[in-house]
Image (cartoon, coloured by chain):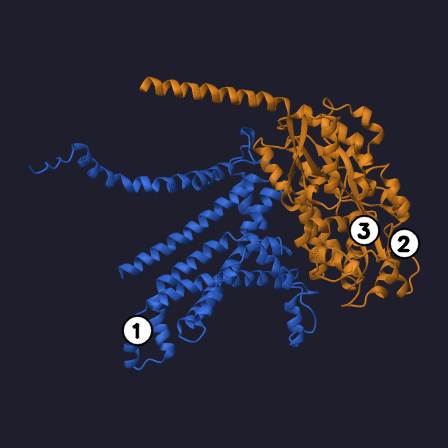
Amino acid sequence: MLVKFFKLCLFVFVLASLIALGTSVLCAQNVELKLATWHWTEPGRGDTLKAICEAFTKEYPNITISPVSLPYARYQDQMMIQMAGNEAPDVLVAADIMFFAFMNLGYLLPLDELINLKALEPEFLDAQKISQINEKTYGLATEYVTYALLYNETLFKEAGIDHPPTTPDEFLEDAKKLTKAPNQYALGTRHSMNEEGGWWYEMSYWVEGFGGKWTTDGKPSVNTPEVINGVKFYKEMYDANIFPKGVDASTYRRMFWQGKIAMLTDNQATFFLALSSNPDLNIKAAPGPFENKLTNAEIVFYTIPKSAKHQKEAAIFLDWFYRHLKDYGLGVQNVVGSKSANKIILEKFPYLMTFVEAPLADNGGILPKGYETRLPEFRHIVLNHVTSVLINNADPKAEMDAAQNELLNLE
Amino acid sequence: MPRKRPFPSKNSRVQKRIWPQFLPYILTTPIILFTVVFVLYPMFQSVIISFYDSRSLLPQANDYAGLKNYVWLFTSPSTLITLRVTLFYVVGTVICSVSLGLVAALLLNVPYRGRGLARAAITVPWGTPLVASALIWFWMFDPQYGVINYFLYLLHLTPQSIQWLITPQWALLSVILVDVWRIFPFGAIVLLTALQAVPANLYDAAAVDGAGSLSKFFHVTLPSIRPSLAITMLLYTIWGMKRFDTIWVLTQGGPLDNTSVMAVQIYREAFRNFRIGRASALAVVGTILSLIITFFYFRKELNHEKA
């Protein structure tokens, strides 16, 4: 009886092993690539990404793309934990801030030996050079969103203004005409620490417009006259009450497409979001009211983590993806994403050339050169002192000097 | 012939003696294992990591920094701000929550029509998902469209809208208000249970001695519910020291770090500044502070019981 039982157990064990072996052989031939990004659930961009992945699988039937979708707010933390635990996805999308953090921690693979980057060079965006460190390329810059002045032409005409402002003084003058609080404001902008990340884009936009740079030669330069002038101007806007205070970005963007705010300093995705929310909105884009017309950008990189399980297949996908971006118009909502896809959009909205033509500020504008991986600490210190200027009426020079000291003493 | 009753086997006698002795250990082993693996081990790891200065979540041997993180902690101006804010936040939350909870418990202890409904309704803040309720309060505090400013303006209590979450003098109070609203029902329920256990003859005796309502409250009610009051305050204190979610949703620690409590600072150091060693050092100090408070509480309770 016992012998029969053991024979049965042995038979089941052998059968299960054969099945497992067979399955693993089959699985080894079919590779499932995990692609992590917050784009999967974005209207427009998510659907386009899915279409691209399906097209890729048609050409490479043994490689399927499995989405790893996380909301943007949790994305960086989750990816850090996964990479630290060697459970990284095969392809990881990273915004510039995350990209530098991941790269500095040694989590990303250099692409030079996996992909023929020379062949892709003609399609490279200007921002591609930011991903090259020590002559190695750690990511492919597939798109970047830039900032410009979005304005409601109808509200401008009602206020008797016939063109968007071209200087800071003109901007302030127009803003006062456009403000009829509490029903109408001239501008929507982030201005508080509960939106620290987004506020940094806006603050950088104004400071760079005045010729300021957060760092010079890799060292903090937050107390130069140009930066202080940018901060002073921001304070002037704050005191003039031209924007609704305490209101977050989702609220003021809604107010913009409801026709209650006349101007935004925002990216092209907001332009399309506003139009999709209110197709009758008469909005245009213009360069910022500065002589240098500089803009900053959030750059999106496609990367391969070092702990990716299918690096070769991930490289095949990245190479194919980059070469076919323009065919699928992934840059449709982000005008500078694809040089060829731009044509369709620009025919319909020619003034969006503003986003394409605006020269990028140093290092993309929001990343202080030399402090890329320490951006969160850097911006927290700077914005804390700017908050003191705005709320406590502190002297801008004194506060920026204090910020400079703190940054120089950062360990 | 009567059926022979089988004599109890030696094995079953042994089982009856040994089994009850081991049963408690068998039943508690899973929870002990869980606590060791998911609570004590991570705490131990956190203590180890606090001696490393690394930007990675898994520090390497060459990242060892000794007491550097603790030196930073005790010399950094931001730590002083964090400790001050945490103290103010905890004290404010505890006092307000306990007071409100006690008032609610007293009101729910008195018989009246609809008391059952009131007892059920009071649990709503406690039962609402944390982040959802914080987001709703965020909207209520909105200077432009929020209902709080709307009603204050309607009642002529303020000439213009208050920026609740971006002005230093209001931000911490706003955060305290939200947390008090959320946690006072717990205190109300605990204290209500304690009130219902107070013997009625104590009040009768007090009435015979000529005690008024206030005297009865201070000399009968409060001493009787003292243990429940104390444990509620202890729990509120410990929860307050690790509060993160509400504050992060509302203010992210701003403005000017005026709402940057310990948990917010730990999160910022770990997941924004990538200073896992410093974050662990802060967490260790926070844990020690919580243990000290708990120690003093239990010592006081022990002395009180002895007395």
Report the residue marked by disc 2.
A166
Tell me the SS state at disc 3. helix
Q: Nearer the viewer, residue B161 or A6?
A: A6
Tint of chain A: orange
Quadrant position of the C terminus of chain B in the picture: bottom left
Is B203 placed left or right of A372 in the picture?
Answer: left
Q: Quadrant of the N terminus of chain B?
A: top left
Query: What residue appears at the point 48 percent right and 44 percent down from the top-left corner?
Result: B284
Q: Of the numbered discs in the image, which one, if any, rests on residue A271?
A: 3
> Circle 1 sits on which residue?
B200
Closer mark to the observer between disc 2 and disc 3: 3
Task: Assess whether mark 3 and mark 2 are in contact (beta carbons under 8 angstroms).
Answer: no
**Left or right side of B224 for A352:** right
Which-is-in-front pick, marks 2 and 1? 1
- Which kind of residue does numbered mark 1 sit on? Ala
Disc 1 secondary structure class: helix
Q: Position of residue A326 (x, y in %)?
A: 82, 35
Judge from the rendering whether residue B105 lies leftward or rightward of residue A317; answer left or right: left
Neighbour tally class for label 2: few under 14, some 14-19, many 20 plus, Cα within 10 Å: some
Residue A264 point in image, percent of width and height: 80, 55
Q: CA distance from mark 2 to mark 3?
A: 20 Å
